Amino acid sequence: SGNKEINCSMTKVDLTASGGNTYKWSTGENSNTISVINSDRYFVTAFAENGCSSTASVSVSQNTTIPTVSITSSANELTCQNSIISLSANGADSYDWTNGEMEVTTPGTYTVIGYNGNGCQAIASVEITKNVEGPKVTIRPSADKLTCDVTAITLQASGADTYNWDGGKLVVTNSGTYTVTGTNNNGCSATASVEITQNVEGPKVTIRPSAD
């Protein structure tokens, strides 16, 4: 009697009978040792030289359940905001990352092998991409020079998703260099500047009276 198990590590089980002179197994085999690959209850009858016999049995179970391995990632794309992505595996008892990494900083395919205690294994992979392209920010002023006619200039930025103006200025009334930082949704940013000049010098008016 006793119990043995067939699994992914042990694909066959050797059963050995003792105590008799000859043997007859329920599989039809006659040797004292047989190899089985299926779960079942196996019987053996042992015969002594005097013709007496007795029977014993053993149950062989089977555990070949394959793990359902999956990968959870903190993000699927490396960006200026997410420069490191954490990977974790689930669904098995132990894991072996083929890239040797659980914290990734470069794009690519990352694969893990998950093992159950029965020796069965399964593979899961995840694709990590990269997007660190910065915006192409430009500024378009409504005019490039402040004058007596143009006392305020509106600045309009384009090329990004959000903008942050130095000094918070969108409408300017003084000459100078104005800078905006544009940021894309991937966290990447770029700056642009525009020079606003000023010409408010009045004419030099003279009056020359005519002679009497």
Image: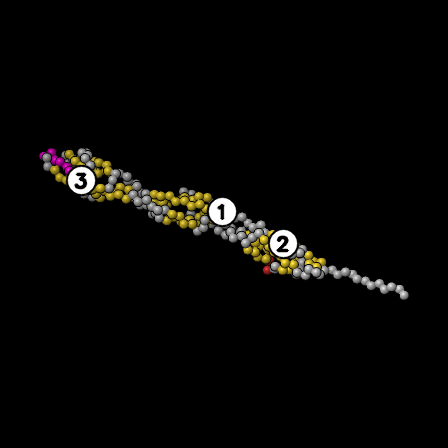
Q: Nearer the viewer, residue 126 or 86?
A: 126
Q: Are marks 3 and 1 in contact (CB under 8 Å)?
A: no
Position of residue 171 relative to residue 34, above or below, is below
The residue located at (18%, 37%) in the rendering is 25
Residue that carries the numbered disc 1 in the rendered image: 130
| Relative depth, front residue between 162 and 211 | 211
Q: Position of residue 205 (x, y in %)?
A: 79, 62
The main secondary structure of the magenta stretch is strand
Q: Identify which residue is drawn at 56% across, 53% down.
A: 160
The quadrant of the image that shows the N terminus is top left
Mark 2: secondary structure: strand
Relative to 200, is 128 on the left or the right?
left
- Residue that lies at the very extreme toward the bottom in this rendered image: 212
- Between the residue at mark 3 and the residue at mark 2, the CA separation in whole angstroms equals 91 Å
Q: Give the percent coordinates (x, y) of residue 95.
A: 37, 45
The three-letter code of the residue at mark 1 reads Lys
The dot on residue 8 is: none
Q: Mark 3 or mark 1, which has the lower sequence index?
A: 3
The residue beneath circle 2 is 140
Left or right: residue 138 versus residue 106 is: right
Residue 6 appears in which quarter of the rendering?
Answer: top left
Instruction: Name the residue nearer the viewer: 1 or 168.
Output: 168
Q: Pointer 3: what residue?
A: 43
Q: Measure how far apart labels 2 and 1 are at the Cα level.
A: 31 Å
* Residue at image coords 44%, 48%: 103
Q: Which residues are magenta?
A: 42-50
Residue 93 vs 175, above or below: the answer is above
Locate residue 4, reporting x and y percent.
Answer: 23, 42
Whichever of labels 2 and 1 marks the residue nearer the N terminus, that label is: 1
Badge 3 amino acid = Phe
Is the residue 43 above or below the residue 183 in the image? above
Residue 155 seen in render: yes
